[in-house]
Image (cartoon, coloured by chain):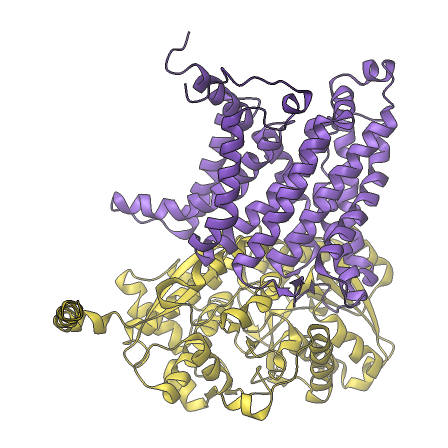
Chain colours: A purple, B yellow
């Protein structure tokens, strides 16, 4: 009832090809965007923005990038942490070595560094598939760990190997307050998400999906596997690289290679699996699930225990958090193997028929 | 309308006046506790956190800081930088604002260093953190009180030189540094290189990837190169692994010197006799179960079932480190109260002043229960470290025993190094050094 499409007729190709063809979706997305841009910065506390929303937005961006590669093109990658690191250190090097370079071009150049790196480590995908490729991309992870720890040039010979940035500005506005950081990340996310959505709807996205579903058949109908796979690696690692640069510049401020360890790669892969492979929405759900939920659990558990008059130690909370989190992952994957995004679309389907389900 | 609001104000004030005793009790100084009791570094992180929390409880049991009680809240970081930042953001504004923060990880120290000046919260890193932050003119908010990794490295080199019969005897010797491949492990390198240049010894750098359980290749290099001494810059599980590898390689444990993160009970317990003779530098204190402080903690907290962690651990190396870290922070608050008003809750900025004007004489330390545990410390605007003393202790198979006199890091070497590295940082960040007027604020 709430989600009825009856009466929404499309009379032109343009109207039929909109990103959100249904009016309710357009309104909802519009409201969400207005809320995220105009309301949240005023309502959210400093902590909420700095410690939850900013990481969530940045990690959503990274998950989006991983989803392009894993979800749309079917190339399983465990090198996402490496792409983030390359983006972060690339942007750092441009930012510090070229004084006066504005922040956003530096972030984009960082993303381009990650693109090159991604294409390089995407080459094995032309020969190997599936789990074999996952192992091959793991090499990217170890290579980047080694590179940023050992090659001093990348870290400007800092004695400790940890680098930091400050005095961030966009168009002369300082990026220091929580709200400005949040808005910067959110703006990047929205722009890139819209571009990606259009990319996956278009010819290139269809090529990726054809390769994902059956690469031999795709080749037979004239899709060049090399072009499709490498373009997926390029686009994906660009997005992940920008996310890495934001993670380093905006969230951490100072970082070391450990910030982009193999754990990060695993987490990103879990995000797209739990969120939903091949879905832009899934990237957001997955990121929320993996980054926000542990923090929520961590803070909610002592409160919940308090209701029953119990006190949990810090260790108890940390362990309970891991157990509940792990349990939830298993439960979600059993209930909905296609991820949270599928749950979402099932919900929409149900709303279409409500209140008279067949 | 005005009358109405006036009446309301009167009503509120009178209500508050009625609740005045309760209000006075609410005067509490908040200290966030970032700890890691889980993960690969938990065996070392837990005793530190126990000592830290116990000391804060002890201060309250002794009546607070001039009557101001301490409140604290623990946040589990798991030694993860992103999670540490989250904890910092979560706790910094709670209960009237954090008075100071002790990140307890070099990675987190680096990240929080960038945030602290904006939030106006002092970052206290007792014996760790970034070494150049001893320069208070550049690092206004960082306090590596009671030593840095450069001090530790310098003390180790001096101890080795004493063993060999003088610094000139180091010429031609080979010293290997086996380090945790992270900013933490890399910290001592500039100082060791400086020393290597001065005395003509050969410094070999052997990194070990975190968390440090995979060291076979590293020790193969040790076997090939046969260094005269091995310095161990490890943490957590890496230390016991290194000692076991040394045993397997046949490298004399007497010739191994650990940093203080590699010189506590959890590091050597599992190795047992295999670690006999292994040395580690201590930033002032070692294992001090006989100190008055440990006895006070047992009497005032553990005997009343209010202690944190097992009673047997009170006075162990990392426990004492936690307690001493907490004490230095608390004394910073006390020093701030002396200037800004006794019995008041201090803001982060005021605590910063207190930490910068710390003057812990021997008498004060004795009164706090730290007699024999540490030497006097006094900080200043330019010197945020306050003291550069260290001792070497050695594992005899059962306990850590001091085997050296007090060693002082050579200021002639440390000072220029601190100044030049801090200047580089200032230039990168376009910071101007603090003026004398700023020092008084």
Residue depicted at 61% across the width and 50% down the height: A185
Query: Vertically, is A269 above or below A81?
Result: above
Q: In this view, does B26 lie to the left or right of A124?
A: left
Residue depicted at 55% across the width and 88% down the height: B438
Q: Which residue lies furthest to the bottom in this view?
A: B436
Residue B437 at what x, y percent from top left? Answer: 55, 92
Q: Which of A256 and A250 is in front in this view?
A: A250
Residue A262 at what x, y percent from top left? Answer: 68, 44
Q: Is residue B23 left or right of residue B226?
A: left
Picture quadrant where residue B305 is located:
bottom left
Quadrant where the N terminus of chain A sits is top left
Query: Vertically, is B361 above or below B69?
Result: below
Q: In this view, does B191 lie to the left or right of A340?
A: right
Q: Which of B432 and B223 is in front in this view?
A: B432
Picture quadrant where residue B361 is located:
bottom left
Residue B79 can be seen, yes or no: no
Quadrant where the C terminus of chain A sits is top left
Residue A190 at what x, y percent from top left? Answer: 62, 42
């Amino acid at each position: 009832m709430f989600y009825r499409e009856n009466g929404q007729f499309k009379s032109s190709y343009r109207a039929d090809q909109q990103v959100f063809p249904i009016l309710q979706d357009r309104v909802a997305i519009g409201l969400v965007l207005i809320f995220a841009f105009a309301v949240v910065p005023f309502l959210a506390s400093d902590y909420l923005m700095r410690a939850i929303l900013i990481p969530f937005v940045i990690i959503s961006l990274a998950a989006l990038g991983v989803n392009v590669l894993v979800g749309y093109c079917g190339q399983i990658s465990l090198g996402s942490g490496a792409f983030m690191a390359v983006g972060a250190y690339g942007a750092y090097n441009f930012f510090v070595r070229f004084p006066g370079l504005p922040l956003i071009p530096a972030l984009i150049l960082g993303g381009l560094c990650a693109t090159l790196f991604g294409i390089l480590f995407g080459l094995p995908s032309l020969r190997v598939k599936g789990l074999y490729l996952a192992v091959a991309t793991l090499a990217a992870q170890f290579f980047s760990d080694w590179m940023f720890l050992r090659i001093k040039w990348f870290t400007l010979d800092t004695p400790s190997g940890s680098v930091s940035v400050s005095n961030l500005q966009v168009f002369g506005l300082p990026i220091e307050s929580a709200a400005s950081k949040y808005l910067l990340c959110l703006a990047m996310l929205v722009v890139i998400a819209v571009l990606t959505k259009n990319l996956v709807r278009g010819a290139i996205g269809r090529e990726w999906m054809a390769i994902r579903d059956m690469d031999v058949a795709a080749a037979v109908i004239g899709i060049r596997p090399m072009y499709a796979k490498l373009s997926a690696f390029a686009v994906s690692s660009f997005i992940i690289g920008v996310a890495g640069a934001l993670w380093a510049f905006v969230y951490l401020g100072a970082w070391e290679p450990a910030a982009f360890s193999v754990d990060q790669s695993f987490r990103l892969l879990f995000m797209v699996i739990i969120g939903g492979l091949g879905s832009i929405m899934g990237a957001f759900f997955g990121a929320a699930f993996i980054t926000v939920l542990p923090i929520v659990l961590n803070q909610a558990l002592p409160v919940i225990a308090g209701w029953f008059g119990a006190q949990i130690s810090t260790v108890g909370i940390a362990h309970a958090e891991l157990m509940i989190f792990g349990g939830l992952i298993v439960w979600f994957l059993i209930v909905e193997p296609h991820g949270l995004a599928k749950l979402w679309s099932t919900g929409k389907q149900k709303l279409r028929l409500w209140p008279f389900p067949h | 309308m005005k009358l109405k609001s006036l009446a309301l104000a009167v009503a509120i004030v009178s209500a508050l006046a009625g609740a005045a005793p309760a209000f006075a009790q609410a005067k509490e100084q908040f200290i966030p506790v970032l700890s890691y009791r889980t993960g690969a570094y938990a065996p070392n992180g837990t005793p530190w956190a126990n000592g830290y929390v116990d000391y804060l409880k002890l201060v309250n049991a002794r009546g607070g800081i001039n009557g101001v009680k301490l409140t604290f809240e623990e946040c589990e970081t798991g030694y993860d930088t992103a999670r540490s930042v989250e904890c910092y953001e979560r706790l910094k504004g709670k209960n009237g604002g954090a008075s100071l923060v002790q990140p307890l990880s070099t990675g987190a120290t680096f990240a929080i260093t960038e945030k602290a000046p904006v939030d106006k919260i002092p970052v206290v890193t007792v014996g760790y953190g970034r070494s150049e932050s001893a320069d208070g003119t550049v690092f206004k908010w960082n306090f590596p009180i009671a030593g840095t990794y450069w001090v530790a490295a310098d003390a180790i080199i001096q101890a080795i030189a004493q063993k060999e019969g003088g610094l000139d005897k180091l010429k031609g010797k080979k010293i290997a540094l086996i380090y945790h491949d992270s900013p933490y492990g890399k910290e001592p390198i500039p100082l060791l290189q400086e020393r290597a240049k001065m005395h003509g010894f050969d410094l070999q750098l052997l990194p070990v990837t975190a968390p440090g359980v995979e060291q076979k290749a590293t020790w193969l290099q040790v076997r090939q190169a046969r260094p005269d001494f091995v310095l161990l810059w490890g943490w957590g599980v890496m230390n016991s692994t290194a000692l076991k590898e040394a045993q397997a390689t046949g490298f004399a444990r007497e010739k191994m010197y650990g940093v203080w993160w590699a010189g506590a009970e959890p590091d050597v317990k599992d190795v047992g006799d295999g670690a006999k003779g292994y040395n580690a530098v201590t930033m002032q204190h070692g294992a001090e179960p006989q100190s008055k402080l440990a006895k006070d903690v047992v009497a005032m907290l553990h005997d009343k079932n209010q202690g944190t962690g097992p009673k047997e651990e009170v006075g162990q190396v990392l426990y004492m480190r936690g307690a001493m870290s907490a004490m230095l922070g608390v004394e910073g608050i006390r020093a701030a109260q002396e200037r800004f008003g006794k019995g008041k809750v201090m803001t982060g900025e005021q605590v910063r002043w207190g930490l910068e004007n710390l003057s812990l004489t021997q008498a004060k330390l004795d009164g706090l229960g730290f007699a024999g545990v540490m030497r006097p410390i006094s900080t200043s605007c330019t010197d945020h470290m306050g003291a550069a003393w260290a001792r070497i202790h050695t594992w005899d198979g059962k306990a850590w025993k001091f085997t050296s006199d007090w060693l002082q890091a050579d200021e002639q070497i440390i000072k220029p190094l601190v100044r030049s590295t801090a200047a580089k940082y200032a230039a990168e960040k376009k910071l101007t050094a603090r003026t004398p007027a700023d020092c008084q604020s």
